[in-house]
Image (cartoon, helix red, strand yellow):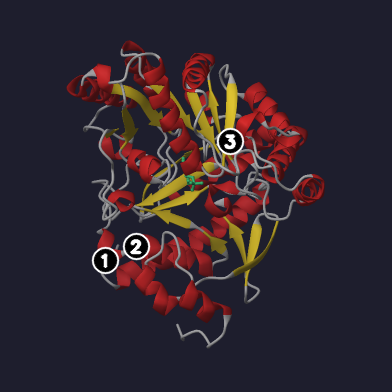
C-alpha cells in the first residue's frame, strides 16, 4: 500500500488519532479505512466503494445507517431540551418514557432502570450495584464476581476484569482481584470426545459449582453472562446450559446479571437473548441496539429485590452516590424511545424470525463443508464461521499466521465489512433490517473471500493441497 498523501485525511489520522482495538504501530504504516457515509445496510468508503456492513458496525446499528426518524427525533429533542441531567431527582420526558418502555419490555419482572453511556459503563454500574446490594443486606464478604472465559463485558477497569479475553487483560494489569472466570460453554472446543451437548452443559455447571465452593459461596456475589457470547466468538451455549447454571446460582444465593448489550432488541429472534436462552436475570444491562447506536446510551435494569436494598442503603447514606453527567441524556433517550417505537411498528421480531433462519440456513449450506471452516454457528441474526487448520481435530491456525486479519481484508475486497474475532472467527451481526437478498449478497462476498483465502493458503502450503 502506498503511503497516504501528506495532508490527506489518512495522513492526518495517522498523525493524530489513537485507535481502539488496533495494532498502533502497524497503523502508522497502513493507516485507516475511512468510512464516509451510510445508507440502509451499507456504508461507503472515502473512495466511493460500497460495503455491506455484516456486523452493523460493532453489532449495533440495528436500523442500518440512514434512519431518518432517528435523525428527526434527535433534532426535535435538541431544539426542545438539548441537555438535562437526572441527579438529585431531576428528570425529563425522554428518560421517563424510555424507563417505562424498558420496564414494560423486560424479559422478567424488573423494578427500575438506570442509564449510562456505554455497555462498559452499564456493567460497571451493575457491579457497583451488586456490591452496594450486598452491603445493604448485611453480607459485606459476598463480593466476588464470576465472568466466563471468552465472555465480553467491556473494557473499563471492572467490566474489563469481568471480560474473559486475553487481549483485554494482557499488559493492562487486569483482571482486578475478586474477578473470577468459569469455563466457556463452547461444545465444539470444550467437549470431551463423544460428550453430548447436554452432558457438556452439566459439566459446565459442575465447573461453576466447583469454583464457587473453592472460593467459598459466602464470598461470591454474582455471575455475569451474555446469552450468546459475542466478541468471544459467537458462542451459543448448549441446550439446558442456563437452566443448570441458574440452579447452581440459586443454591448459593448468587445473583445473575444478563449482559444483553449484543443480544437485546431482537438480535436472537426474541426481544431479549434471555428469552431465547431461558435466563431469568436479577439485573440486565443493555446498550447498542437500544438506540440503534445513533447516540450513545446504555441501561441497567434491576429487579425489586435488588432495588429495595439499594433504596434502603441510599436512604441510610443519604444518596445513591453513583451516576454520570450524561445518565439518561435527553437527546440519546429520545433517540432510544424512537428506536423502540420503530421496532414495535416494524414488527421487528417477525422480521428477524423470518430472515434469521435464512441467514442460519445459508451459512450452513454454503460453508459447513468448506475446507477452511470448522464450525458454523448462530441463532437469529447473529452467527459465525470459525476457520480451522485441521477440521477433524478442531484445531485452530497459529495466531501468528493472522489468518483472521487476512480474511477481513479479502472480505472487504469483496464488498463486505466483516469482523474477525480471536480464533479466526468471522462474526455476522448485520443490521436487523437486512433482507434475504442482502444476506445472499453478503454471503456471496464472504464465499468468494474464503475461496481466495483457501487458494492463497494452499499456495503458501499453510493448508494441504487437496
Ligand atoms: C456483550 C457486551 N457487553 C459489553 C460491551 C461493552 O460495550 P461498550 O463498547 O459500549 O463499552 C460489549 C461491546 O461490544 C458487548 O458486546
Relative image position of residue 361 (x, y in whole percent): 53, 41
For label 2, the SS is helix
Q: Nearer the viewer, residue 353 or 298?
A: 298
Near mark 2 (Cα within 10 A), the count class, few <14, some 14-19 or many ≥20, is many
Near mark 1 (Cα within 10 A), the count class, few <14, some 14-19 or many ≥20, is few
Q: Are marks 2 and 3 in contact (CB under 8 Å)?
A: no
* Disc on the earlier residue, 3 or 1: 3
Mark 2 lies within 8 Å of ligand 1 (Cβ measured): no
Observer-side mark, 3 or 1, equals: 3
Eyeballing the image, is 146 above or below 149? above
Q: Is residue 335 left or right of residue 6?
A: right
Q: Nearer the viewer, residue 244 or 163?
A: 163
The Cα–Cα distance between marks 2 and 3, rounded to whole angstroms, is 39 Å
The Cα–Cα distance between marks 1 and 2, rounded to whole angstroms, is 10 Å
The disc label shown at residue 115, or none: 3
* Disc on the earlier residue, 2 or 3: 3
Tell me where residue 230 sits by quadrant.
top left
Q: Quadrant of the N terminus?
A: bottom left
Q: Are marks 1 and 2 in contact (CB under 8 Å)?
A: yes
Q: Residue at x 65, y 36 (%)?
A: 354
Q: Which residue is mark 1?
A: 462
Q: Which residue is mark 2?
A: 403
Relative image position of residue 138 (x, y in whole percent): 35, 14
Q: Residue at x 68, y 37 (%)?
A: 351
Tell me where residue 265 sits by quadrant.
top right
Q: Is residue 92 left or right of residue 374?
A: right
Amino acid at each position: 500500500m502506498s503511503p497516504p498523501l501528506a495532508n490527506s485525511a489518512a495522513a492526518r489520522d495517522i498523525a493524530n488519532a489513537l485507535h481502539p482495538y488496533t495494532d498502533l504501530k502497524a497503523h502508522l504504516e497502513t493507516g485507516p479505512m475511512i468510512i464516509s457515509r451510510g445508507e440502509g445496510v451499507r456504508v461507503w468508503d472515502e473512495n466511493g466503494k460500497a460495503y455491506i456492513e455484516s456486523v452493523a458496525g460493532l453489532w449495533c446499528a440495528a436500523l442500518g445507517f440512514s434512519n431518518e426518524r432517528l435523525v428527526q427525533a434527535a433534532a426535535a429533542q435538541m431544539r426542545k431540551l438539548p441537555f438535562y441531567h437526572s441527579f438529585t431527582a431531576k428528570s425529563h420526558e425522554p428518560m421517563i418514557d424510555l424507563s417505562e418502555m424498558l420496564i414494560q419490555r423486560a424479559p422478567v419482572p424488573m423494578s427500575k432502570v438506570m442509564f449510562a453511556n456505554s455497555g462498559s459503563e452499564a456493567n460497571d454500574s451493575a457491579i457497583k450495584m451488586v456490591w452496594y446490594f450486598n452491603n445493604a443486606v448485611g453480607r459485606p464478604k459476598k463480593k466476588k464476581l464470576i465472568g466466563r472465559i471468552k465472555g465480553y463485558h467491556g473494557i473499563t477497569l471492572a467490566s474489563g476484569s469481568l471480560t474473559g479475553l486475553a487481549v483485554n487483560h494482557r499488559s493492562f494489569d487486569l483482571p482486578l482481584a475478586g474477578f473470577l472466570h468459569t469455563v466457556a460453554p463452547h461444545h465444539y472446543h470444550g467437549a470431551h470426545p463423544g460428550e453430548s451437548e447436554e452432558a457438556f452443559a452439566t459439566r459446565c455447571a459442575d465447573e461453576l459449582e466447583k469454583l464457587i465452593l473453592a472460593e467459598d459461596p459466602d464470598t461470591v456475589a454474582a455471575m455475569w453472562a451474555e446469552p450468546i457470547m459475542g466478541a468471544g466468538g459467537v458462542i451459543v451455549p448448549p441446550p439446558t446450559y442456563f437452566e443448570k447454571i441458574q440452579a447452581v446460582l440459586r443454591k448459593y444465593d448468587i445473583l445473575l446479571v444478563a449482559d444483553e448489550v449484543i443480544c437485546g432488541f431482537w438480535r436472537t429472534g426474541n426481544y431479549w437473548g434471555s428469552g431465547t436462552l431461558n435466563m431469568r436475570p436479577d439485573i440486565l444491562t443493555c446498550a447498542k441496539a437500544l438506540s440503534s447506536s445513533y447516540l450513545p446510551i446504555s441501561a441497567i435494569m434491576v429487579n425489586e429485590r435488588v432495588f429495595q436494598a439499594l433504596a434502603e442503603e441510599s436512604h441510610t447514606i443519604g444518596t445513591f452516590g453513583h451516576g454520570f453527567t450524561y445518565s439518561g441524556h435527553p437527546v440519546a433517550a429520545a433517540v432510544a424511545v424512537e428506536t423502540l417505537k420503530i421496532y414495535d411498528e416494524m414488527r421487528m421480531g417477525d422480521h428477524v424470525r423470518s430472515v434469521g433462519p435464512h441467514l442460519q440456513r445459508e451459512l450452513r449450506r454454503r460453508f459447513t463443508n468448506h475446507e477452511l471452516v470448522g464450525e458454523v454457528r448462530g441463532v437469529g441474526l447473529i452467527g459465525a464461521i470459525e476457520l480451522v487448520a485441521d477440521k477433524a481435530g478442531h484445531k485452530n491456525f497459529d495466531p501468528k499466521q493472522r489468518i483472521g486479519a487476512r480474511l477481513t481484508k479479502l472480505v472487504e475486497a469483496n464488498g463486505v465489512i466483516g469482523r474477525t474475532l480471536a480464533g479466526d472467527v468471522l462474526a455476522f451481526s448485520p443490521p436487523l433490517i437486512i433482507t434475504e437478498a442482502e444476506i445472499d449478497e453478503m454471503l456471496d462476498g464472504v464465499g468468494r473471500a474464503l475461496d481466495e483465502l483457501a487458494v492463497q493458503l494452499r499456495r503458501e502450503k499453510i493448508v494441504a493441497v487437496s
